[in-house]
Amino acid sequence: MAVDVTVSREAGDWAENAEWLAEKAALAALAAIYDEEDGPAEMSVVLADDALVHQLNRDYRGKDKPTNVLSFALTEADEPEPEEGAPVLLGDVILAFETVRREAAEQNKAPADHMTHLVVHGVLHLLGYDHETDDEAEEMEALETRLLADLGIADPYAANRLLPDSPDGADPTNHEPPDR
């Protein structure tokens, strides 16, 4: 694949293999979605902490709180094409250690699986996927679920789906998709 993924550990008490897991997750998402005919590309994953993500979320999104993952796409339709042979700069995916760890515990998920999901989610944002509408969310979640299954990780949205044979017709638990 013609995509270079750089992973850096900026803050947080990430597991020893976190860089490897982040790179593996990013490459899996890119392999399924990125069109190699677009030429070489570069992206980064930053393993950070809540303080750094809080600052970025406040400064760039106007949300004065930490979140689990932020994606900063560097490719826009109105930007000039890169020079011949130069890589396309896809952008950055930034994870917040404390939030990822807390959410994994709350959702009874392995921290590594939750981190992998958030990297996949963030990369899909870099490639233009979103979840602003129900149709977009359904498409993005289905793709995430398929990519994670290929990595041996259970459907992260399974607990949030309404069971069709639910006797009381109760709504599924509150579904907050990973943040952007």
Image: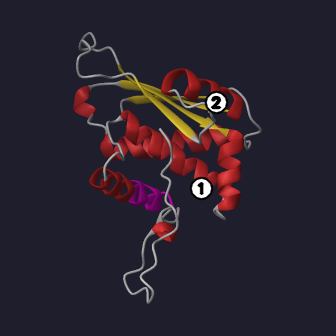
* Residue stretch in magenta: 144-152
Name the residue rendered at 43%, 85% in the picture. Answer: 166
Mark 1 or 2 closer to N-term?
Answer: 2
Give the residue at mark 1: 113
The reply, left or right, for residue 93 in relation to residue 33 is right
**Residue 82 at what x, y percent from top left?**
28, 13
Give the number of the disc on residue 54. Answer: 2
Name the residue rendered at 70%, 29% in the picture. Answer: 51
**Residue 117 at what x, y percent from top left?**
52, 51
Return the residue nearer the eye: 31 or 177: 177
Return the residue nearer the eye: 107 or 31: 107
Disc 1/disc 2 C-alpha distance (Å): 23 Å
Q: Is residue 78 within the magenta segment?
A: no
**Quarter of the view holding residue 161:** bottom left
Q: Could you tell me if residue 9 is visible in this image?
A: no
25 w.r.t. 148: above or below: above
Name the residue rendered at 63%, 62% in the picture. Answer: 107
**Residue 23 at what x, y percent from top left?**
54, 38
134 w.r.t. 45: above or below: below
Question: Do residues under tags 1 and 2 come within 8 Å of each other at their CB atoms?
Answer: no
The secondary structure that dominates the magenta segment is: helix
Q: Residues within 10 Å of mark 2 (few under 14, many from 20)?
A: some
**Residue 67 at what x, y percent from top left?**
59, 39
- Which residue type carries mark 2? His
- Which residue type carries mark 1? Asp
